[in-house]
Amino acid sequence: MLERLPGPGVIAAVPSQLMRLIGRDSELAALAELVGRRRLITLVGQGGIGKTRLAAELAHKESGRYPGGVWWVELASAEQPSDVLAAWGHALNMPLRFKSDADQPVLDFLSRLDDSLVVVDNCEQVLDRVAALIERVLILCPCVSVLATSRSPLEIGGEVTWRVAPLSLPPADVDAQGIALEQYSATALFLERARQGEADRTFAAADGAAVQKICAMLDGNPFAIQLAAARSSALTIDELLRALSDSLDVLQLHSTRGPHRARSVTASIRWSVDLLDPRARTLLGRLSVFPSSFTAEAAAAVSDSSDTDSNDPRLPLTRLVDFGLIDFEPSSGRYRLLFTVRKFAAERLYEHHETARVRARHGRYWLERAIALTRWGNTFSPDKIIGAGADDLAGVAMGDGR
Ligand SMILES: Nc1ncnc2c1ncn2[C@@H]1O[C@H](COP(=O)(O)OP(=O)(O)OP(=O)(O)O)[C@@H](O)[C@H]1O
Ligand SMILES: [Mg+2]
């Protein structure tokens, strides 16, 4: 579907939401400035982080500056490359029997527009095809700018990738009973959704700490937070926290409406994982043995790159970062799986009967490091060893069978 927002002479609809937007003021201000300067911006990030929501808000807010209109191309249901053009063509009322250059009618139409913005939502599953089309639009239609949303970048020259950040969380060390949880977007979203349909619902002061932990566990992801909050109607906040620590099953809708990937956190993560190449997919499962952050060296040790044909063993790691499945902290050079992704990946590893083998590799890696440290140090110091590998050691010690 491709539609217009009202502009001079054009009428259409960018999705509107019944629920108010929480936070995102600084992102909207910065993006408004950026769309005025750059012709292709891609909002990237993990499933449910709020890419579509942010794009829709921006489109509404900035529609006045585009006399040629704001166009919304929805690719969520495009399964094959041929569906991409069909979506554009259908909305433009163009016959779909294209011959030599199928893109031409779309390009002709867009090249005649005055300043306009095309928002292309959910590009990831038809990435190459849509990237090729957008590239041609940018070259041949000088008055058109593009705002795309995708779980991974389009990788087109001139693209500005904007990684959508998690909603803000209260600092971990703050006393949650003494702060207003509404001040932070993640906890404010949880409270607002938990009160949905029960506006006067109150929470005990002690619930604050559990709400803070739930939102931190969900890495500030609005989709996951909404699903968790919805379950709080039939669970105490502490029960919800315990249920979440056990399994992702609690993060799902009862409803069967809407796209499958928007019904549970597991389905949302699977949507990304299915788009990965087999090497990155295998690596993700193996990385689940790390309970917290890890280095590229440790990742290589548990992944046993001898069973892949990669020239650059870091390539699959980079793919996982591109898809927002793992975080990379440039200042420390360490990676980290999101909590929900780690749970998902650990299940896959277990299903493939690989858990014991990968744990053993992890244990061996840490043992070798510990031995090397005692050799290099002049004196044997257990503190030094543990300090150098606390995260890895914690992973080795976690004998929970999964
Ligand atoms: N800042 C926010 N305030 C309130 N609700 C939000 C906010 N950000 C996102 N949401 C809600 O969270 C849900 C997930 O957001 P959205 O669909 O934009 O994620 P996405 O990144 O586009 O996910 P996907 O990769 O699956 O397309 C939606 O219901 C959306 O309305
Ligand atoms: Mg989306």
Image (cartoon, helix red, strand yellow):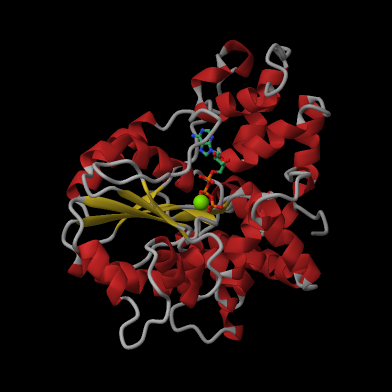
Relative image position of residue 3 (x, y in whole percent) = 40, 52
Depicted 104 relative to depicted 220: above or below: below
Q: Is residue 219 visible?
A: no
Which residue is more in the foreground, 392 or 144? 144
Which image quadrant for residue 360?
A: bottom right
Q: Residue at x 37, y 65 (%)?
A: 154
Which image quadrant for residue 128?
A: bottom left
- Which quadrant would the C terminus be assigned to in this image? bottom right
Which residue is more in the foreground, 66 or 300? 66
Could you tell whether 2 is left or right of 100 in the image? right
Relative image position of residue 149 (x, y in whole percent) = 42, 54
Q: Is residue 294 visible?
A: yes
Which residue is more in the foreground, 84 or 401? 84
Q: Residue at x 19, y 69 (%)?
A: 139
Could you tell whether 54 is left or right of 70 in the image? right
Depicted 286 relative to depicted 29: above or below: below
Relative image position of residue 378 (x, y in whole percent) = 50, 56
Count of number-bearing discs: 0
Relative image position of residue 255 (x, y in whole percent) = 75, 45
Could you tell whether 211 is left or right of 374 in the image? right
Q: Residue at x 69, y 25 (%)?
A: 194
Which residue is more in the foreground, 173 or 170? 170
Could you tell whether 190 is left or right of 314 in the image? right
